[in-house]
Amino acid sequence: MHSSLAKHLHSDECVRWIEAYEQCNKEKYLGVCSDLQNKMAGCMQRELRNRRNIGAENVKKRELDNYAKHNPEFAAKLKLLDDLKAQKEHNNSKENLYTSFQWNSLTIYLINPFPRNTLSKAFDLCREI
């Protein structure tokens, strides 16, 4: 048994499968539309799985926020953790854009069109030659 076929409850992809399934049932005999029914049910299961995952993530965040409201020390640590995550993401994106090296007391930055591992492989090849 599948869930409700109400079109306002589902994504555009599932609505297309629902419409194709209903059209097939109007035009053809029972049993011919099994393939469409399976694809429609699969789409609805993916939607349900995605909703469950989003709900679990929201519950975890809500629990952390509620605990932080009653515990200022934990709130400070949570904010520090968020700041560190943001800084790490910023550094990772910056690392991919620039290559830096020291020359005397200067730090020289070069724009890097390649990822870090590709550039280091190129330097290793040059050393071998």
Image (cartoon, rainbow, N blue to C red):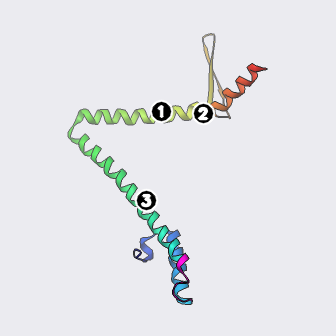
Vertical placement of residue 58 versus 118, above or below:
below
At mark 2, the secondary structure is: helix
Which mark is nearer the camera, 1 or 3? 3
Q: Which mark is residue 50?
A: 3
Give residue 95's position: percent from left, percent from top.
Answer: 57, 30
- For label 1, the residue is 88
Estimate the spatial distance between the alpha carbons at disc 1 and disc 3, rounded to whole Å: 28 Å
Residue pictured at 45% horizontal, 68% vertical: 44
Give residue 126's position: percent from left, percent from top.
Answer: 75, 22
Residue pictured at 74% horizontal, 24% vertical: 125
Label 3 sits on what residue type?
Asn
- For label 2, the residue is 96
Toward the viewer: 34 or 58? 34
Specify start and end residues of the magenta stretch as a single range.
28-35
Name the dominant secondary structure of the magenta segment.
loop
* Local crowd size for mark 3, using a 10 Å CA cut-off: few (<14), some (14–19), many (≥20): few
Label 2 sits on what residue type?
Asn
Which mark is nearer the camera, 2 or 3? 3
Estimate the spatial distance between the alpha carbons at disc 2 and disc 1, rounded to whole Å: 12 Å
Which quadrant of the figure has residue 45? bottom left
Estimate the spatial distance between the alpha carbons at disc 2 and disc 3, rounded to whole Å: 32 Å
At mark 1, the secondary structure is: helix
Q: Which mark is residue 18?
A: none
